[in-house]
Image (tube, rainbow, N blue to C red):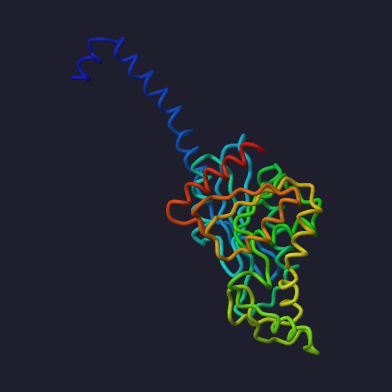
Amino acid sequence: MLSILFKKNSIVKTVYSFICLIALFLYPPVLAQENAYEPQPVTLQLTNKIAAYGEFYPGESNKPVVMILHSFMLTHNFQTVKQLAESLHESSYTVLTPSLSCEAIHTHSLLGDLKDINQWVNWLTAKTGKKITLIGHSAGSSQLIAYIHHYPEAPVNQLIFLSMPNFGDTPNSYATRKDIELAQKIPDKNELKKFALSYCKEYVTTANNFISYYNLSKDNLYQYLKQTPIKKTLILGSEDTRVDKNWNKSLASTNTTIIIIEGANHFFDAKYEFDLLDTVESVLTDHP
């Protein structure tokens, strides 16, 4: 039928050709845009021998750039981090979720972790050309404020802490005073020993490395928070049993905004993941 119309009506033929031409111009950019916004695996060569891995979620250029750091001994694939990253990506934010380098025998120190974080921050800044909002979950929050303390010139415009604890005397932690006393008494501080740290019963590392993490105490974190001029927000679940509620109440004097999500636990799982997303997006909107 269409071929008959083409033979009898040159106007129909012209209009059809015009429509096809428009489609050729419009369709490829749509495909390219969809591919451009797909999550991308990232490998960052930290040293000649050590590489770290992450996932990059490209977003719209007019939205804030976000980096989300996982908790202690976990990776960027941990549920709380991954769900938040995917949800922010659906809202067109650019998001990076890196993993810190980690080995079965933990030869890393806190300062080594901070160096890794700095390399990821520099990578993301070079990629986007923008300052970054850093979000940390659990011990990842503690590491981020320590990072800002040691790298005060980092291109970061705000910090969002989720369920931030401290090392050492965190509620329900396996670490005890015996562990720090053992680490302090060992003559060879580079000798491998078993310690308990955070929620890891057997943490094999050197005394020096153990002490570096244990020193993320309430007092030190309080001072780090108080000293940084960067905008800070702490988001807590009211049912979080892994964070000292009395300690966190005192953080208000560090010019940190504290937001409580009623009913949520340490991981903001189940229905509270939506409350967490809404809260994070609200903070990002208030301070892009």
109 to the left or right of 98: right
Residue 31 spot, x, y in % from top left: 45, 37
Image vertical order of residue 133 relative to residue 78, above or below: above
Quadrant the N terminus occupies: top left
Residue situated in front as seen by the camera: 221 or 17? 221
Q: Farthest front residue?
A: 246
Quarter of the image holding residue 179? bottom right
Report the front residue among 179 and 18.
179
Classify residue 183 as left or right of residue 283: right
Q: Can you say whether 112 is above or below 81 in the image?
A: below
Place of residue 203 in the rendered image (x, y in percent of width and height, measured from the top left)? 62, 80
Foreground of the two, 244 or 126: 244
Please report the residue visible at 70 percent of the width from the left and 58 percent of the height from the top.
Answer: 144
Q: Is residue 19 above or below residue 133?
A: above
Q: Residue at x 40, y 26 (%)?
A: 23
Residue 109 position within the rendered picture, expressed as x and y whole percent measured from the top left: 72, 72
Q: Residue furthest left?
A: 1
Q: Is residue 129 above or below residue 211?
A: above
Residue 56 coordinates in the image, percent (x, y): 57, 51
Quarter of the view holding residue 163: bottom right
Residue at the (55%, 55%) spot, across then down: 237
Screen quadrant of the C terminus: top right
Q: How many marks?
A: 0
